[in-house]
Image: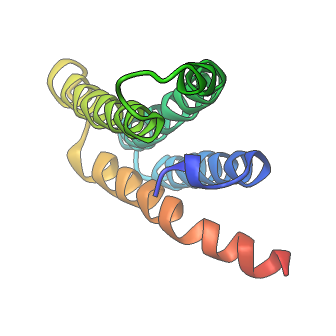
Amino acid sequence: MSVSVYSGKIALKLLFFQLMTFVLISTVFLLKSLEWSVSALVGGLAARLPSVMFMLYVYAVCLCCMFMLFALCHQVQMPLSGRVAWSFAIGEGLKVASTIIFLIVALGVFKVAFIPLGLAYLAVLVVQIVAPAMINSYRT
């Protein structure tokens, strides 16, 4: 799930857990070699940077919602819910596209090792799914 579903504090905790995950994995891979450590770092960044960019995009969309509410009051052609849904869909599409670009650049241009890159990338994705449930369970 994207960070837009959660409150700001939970989103920041989630991004912090993602950061700690790939920094820790990168540190563990440093025991093998510096190349594997850098590869894990790049893999974690490939998963985390689009989330950060999407979170900033969501905040920008929320600011634009004030204008959309004003436009709705003045009977605009397309309903407000359609515009908000499209802007979130565009944001998710940009997030996926930027992730693919980051991974292509990491593998193609910088020639990083695939195994640590993939493991760090998957670990950050797992944290993105599991951490909100754990944060919510400790909140109550």
Q: Residue furthest right?
A: 140
In-image side of 40 versus 90 (left or right): right
In-image side of 75 versus 109 (left or right): right
Residue nearest the observer in this picture, 63 or 132? 63
The percent coordinates of residue 63 (x first, y second) are 66, 23
In-image side of 50 versus 127 (left or right): left
Residue visible at 58% across and 54% down in the picture: 5
Residue nearest the observer in this picture, 35 or 88? 88
Say above or below: 106 vs 135. above
Residue nearest the observer in this picture, 16 or 108? 16
Q: Residue furthest left?
A: 108
In-image side of 62 versus 31 (left or right): right
Residue visible at 83% across and 74% down in the picture: 139
The percent coordinates of residue 14 (x first, y second) are 65, 53
Residue nearest the observer in this picture, 129 or 107? 129
In this rendering, does residue 27 appear at all? no
Say above or below: 71 vs 112. above
